[in-house]
Image (cartoon, rainbow, N blue to C red):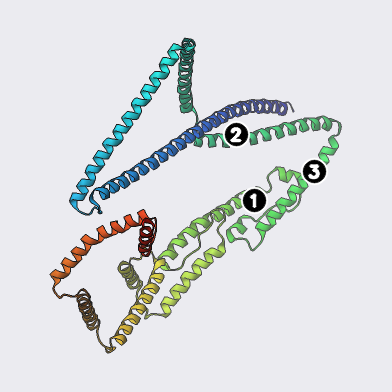
Amino acid sequence: MESVKSKIGEMEDESLNRVCQQQNKIKELQKEHKALQAKCEHYEKKQMEQQETIASLQKDIYRLTKEDEERIITRNRVFSYLCKRVPHTILDRQLLCLIDYYESKIRKFHKQRQYREDESQSEEDYRSLSASPTYKGLLMSLQNQLKDSKSKIDALLSEKVNLQKDLETRPTQHELRLYKQQVKKLEKALKKSIKLQDLISQKKAEDKEGKDEPSKDNQQQTLIDQRYFQVLRSINSIIHNPRAPVIIYKQSKGGAQHFNRDLVQDCGFEHLVPIIEMWADQLASLKDLYKSLKILSAGLVPWHNLKKQDENEGVKVEDLLFIVDTMLEEVENKEKDSNMPDFQILRAIVSHFQKLFDVPSLTGVYPRMNEVYTRLGEVNNAVRNLQELLELDSSSSLCVLVSTVGKLCRLVNEDVNEQVMQVLGPEDLQSIINKLEEHEEFFPAFQAFTNDLLEILEIDDLDAIVPAVRKLKILSH
């Protein structure tokens, strides 16, 4: 009893030390959590600032695009005012560049003039302020504000440096996860230690009560021993069963049959432990057997897709029997069908098909074969339709079909050329080219003229130009 009490005291001291360590670690983790929250807020502020800069840049881009559009519009307006037409030659482009240059100069002069006007206005305001009596007081207050702001900026910079150093020493997200896991483990250990303390206190109370009532404890202990003995007898009967494996059955003969306290204390069931360990080893070796059978089946019957085993599930004997049965069926089929080609030949054919039609895996062979078959059927149908349309024989080759289609295309092109020549009038190609060039020179000026008319008359349709001009003529009379 004294040794048990000393052990209990040691366990209590250890549990108290652990509890103190756990509480210290929890406090440290809480501090780190607060620091990480502050870091999160800092990064959120940075994100808001970046969003504001992005919005300002978008506004600048919009303003620049508007200025560019206005520049192009003014340039075209000046050119149309000077030349009364639309630019379309190299000289016109050079003239546009010159217009851009002078327009930029004019805008620059306008800005300088506005800047000088603003400067003169500010000087007048400054003179008026210097003339006022409260100007010196304002200057002093501004100087004091500048000093305060500089001191605040220095303090913020030092605080920023300290925060950066603190952030560098802070743990990363991965370390934080590890700390959280450790906290959970420590909480579990704390709960266990609390339960252990409760059990120890209960044990002490039971020890005190046991001194008064030793007979009740002896009766409970005998009942527990009888239950344990029944469990051991049931395990021993399973091992003695003739359905057990032969080696295990031979090793398990001669077990205990009747309850005896002395026999239990003398390890009468000690032969059960190695037998159960051997069973566990045999069950664990089933996984290795499953892997080797899987490799063997992949070599013999690679077209059979075995389902992937879940790592959490154990290996079943039914799965092993299924793999062996599939391999046996394949061997029996090979023996029956002796006229079948060799596996190497079939594999070479499949690999050749994969190279021809760019199939990376075996699972894609059947879909690609179906695709090739459908494409071949479509091509055959198209060839038959062309042969029927061109009134060719069904036995004619593809070369004949291609040559006839080429002849038809040439005939169609010749007909188109004749129609163009009929529409344009003269048969000379040079005259046609000259007419097209005249059209290219005339059409832009005509288009610019019509656009100007539409803008002046404030109408949208070409048909409305003549009525609008007539109205103006009537109004002028």
In the image, 289 versus 18, the foreground residue is 18
Q: Are marks 1 and 2 in contact (CB under 8 Å)?
A: no
Mark 1 residue crowding within 10 angstroms, few (<14) / some (14–19) / many (20+): some
Image coordinates of residue 375 in percent, x first then y, are 36, 75
Foreground of the two, 102 or 359: 102
The location of residue 17, given as percent across then percent down, is 64, 25
The mark nearer the N terminus, 1 or 2, is: 2
Residue type marked 2: Val
* Residue indicated by mark 2: 183
Q: Is residue 425 left or right of residue 380?
A: left
Quadrant for residue 374, please give it.
Answer: bottom left
Residue type beneath disc 3 = Thr
Tell which circle, 2 or 3, labels the residue nearer the N-terminal end: 2
The image quarter containing residue 245 is bottom right
* Residue type (three-letter) at the residue carrying disc 1: Leu
Residue at image position (41%, 71%) is 366
**CA gap, disc 1 to disc 2?**
40 Å
Picture coordinates of residue 361, whole percent (x, y): 38, 64
From the image, tell me which residue sits under label 1. Answer: 272
Circle 2 SS class: helix
Q: In this figure, which residue is indicated by the disc labeled 3?
A: 222
Vertical placement of residue 331 versus 194, above or below: below
Question: Which element type, helix, strand or loop, lies under badge 3?
Answer: helix
Q: Residues within 10 Å of mark 3 (few under 14, many from 20)?
A: few
- Assess disc 2: are there few (<14), some (14-19) or many (≥20) residues with their C-alpha within 10 Å of its C-alpha: some
Position in image of residue 277 (x %, y %): 59, 50
Residue sitting at x 42%, y 77%:
335
Q: 387 or 230: which is nearer to us?
A: 387
